[in-house]
Image: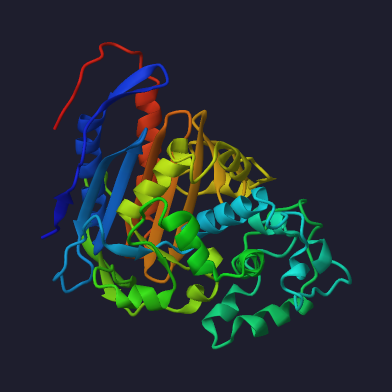
Amino acid sequence: MFFRMSCTLLAIFFSLSSSAINISQFNNEFSLQVSKQLKQYSIPGGTYAIVQNNTIVAIESFGHTDKTKSHQIDSNTVFRLASVSKTFAATLTTMLAQEHKLSLSDPITKYVPNFVLATDGAAQKIQLKHLLSHSTGLMPNAFDNLLHENWDMEKIIGRFERITPICPPEKCYGYQNIAYSMLQGAIEASQDKDYASLLQERVFSPLNMTHASVGIDVYKEQINTAKPHILRKRVKTGKKDQQGREINEYVWRTVKVSPDYYKVAPAAGINASITDLAKWLIANLGHKPEVLSPALLTEITTPRIRTKKDLRRRYWREYLTDAHYGYGWRIYQFKGQKIIYHSGWVAGFRAEIGYAPDLDLGFAILINAESNTISKISSQFWSQVANLSSRPLTKRTKSTL
């Protein structure tokens, strides 16, 4: 039996643009949608959070940490964030730049001297800001395949001498993980502290993100962790739904957490609970200026490079009219509304997070399975919010749970 635990903390009535949403009613309906979709694909477990203003409006948890169903997912269960980790790395790097402890115009070779490309002088032209915005000119996902090999990072970086850039820096978009992780060298050189300690000191502790951490060792030490799942098989049932579509049965297998992408900590090495992500959203919405200043938030969410490929994303393409990458965040134009967004995917986990500054609203979701239903759920959330926010205002009333 699929388990759903409601952890709604507070229901409020708030204004969105020229309209109002009864968040209690909205969340009750939305959580049923999420529960149905996770059950449809037999997702072992998941959880989401909605924040508005300076408040965690709702946290909903579904299912279990693994296939044994011995531990239910709750608001403090730790997941891998995968590429959502980039939002933290970019924030910390930009924070240090604004404190003049490093410069975003520094060439990456200043911090990673063994980084060489096939074209003479090309490596020296790639600056920290190009890493932050995936505008290095390198082919997309350069040497990500080597993360699955028993190679250390120094050896992997040495392979870049075989790569010829596909364009000059800032002229084209190419998503990176290994190159993105080179930010760690700059961050650590600026403070003479390791990356994990700096994140803890500058972000996790000030925002009271009590379950957030960096690295596989910390993940393994924690008790309340979601376990990764990969799809073992998809079985046709011979049945059809009301729309006449084939109904499949999805069978997931619990696997061990993979160390591969932990090698690139700034790109994919953070672990956190949904409660931690809710606090991260509140800070990025501007409600923790003593930690994330308005100038910092403006800098990281300024569009730097257009990402046309995002306009073809499944589940999102019918809503998006434009897409860019800033520093560690994607900037979408979604039904005329600006959404600051990122997703993540590593073996056995998916993560998505986004917020609408003009609506003062944020949403994050985590699941412990490699299913694209998470993208469907996220796009549905923002679509429904956009529809509700465009309705004419009728009557303002208070709502409680």
Tell me which corner region of the image, top left, top right, bottom left or bottom right, holds residue 11. Answer: top left
Q: Is residue 231 above or below residue 239?
A: below
Q: Is residue 386 above or below residue 31?
A: above
Residue 317 can be seen in this image = no
In this view, the residue farthest toward the bottom is 150
**Residue 63 placement (x, y as % from top left):** 19, 60
Query: Residue at left 31%, top 52%?
Result: 275
Query: Residue at left 32%, top 20%?
Result: 20
**Residue 154 placement (x, y as % from top left):** 66, 82
Q: Is residue 380 left or right of residue 107?
A: left
Q: Nearer the viewer, residue 176 or 289?
A: 289
**Residue 339 placement (x, y as % from top left):** 49, 38
Query: Residue at left 53%, top 76%?
Result: 263
Q: Is residue 92 left or right of residue 97?
A: left
Residue 387 can be seen in this image = yes
| Colouring scheme applied when the structure was drawn | rainbow
Q: Is residue 106 above or below residue 22?
A: below
Q: Give the quadrant of the N terminus.
A: bottom left
Q: How many marks?
A: 0
Q: Nearer the viewer, residue 40 or 336?
A: 336
In this view, the residue farthest toward the top is 394
Q: Give the quadrant of the C terminus.
A: top left
In this view, the residue farthest toward the left is 1
**Residue 75 placement (x, y as % from top left):** 24, 55
Query: Residue at left 74%, top 66%?
Result: 108
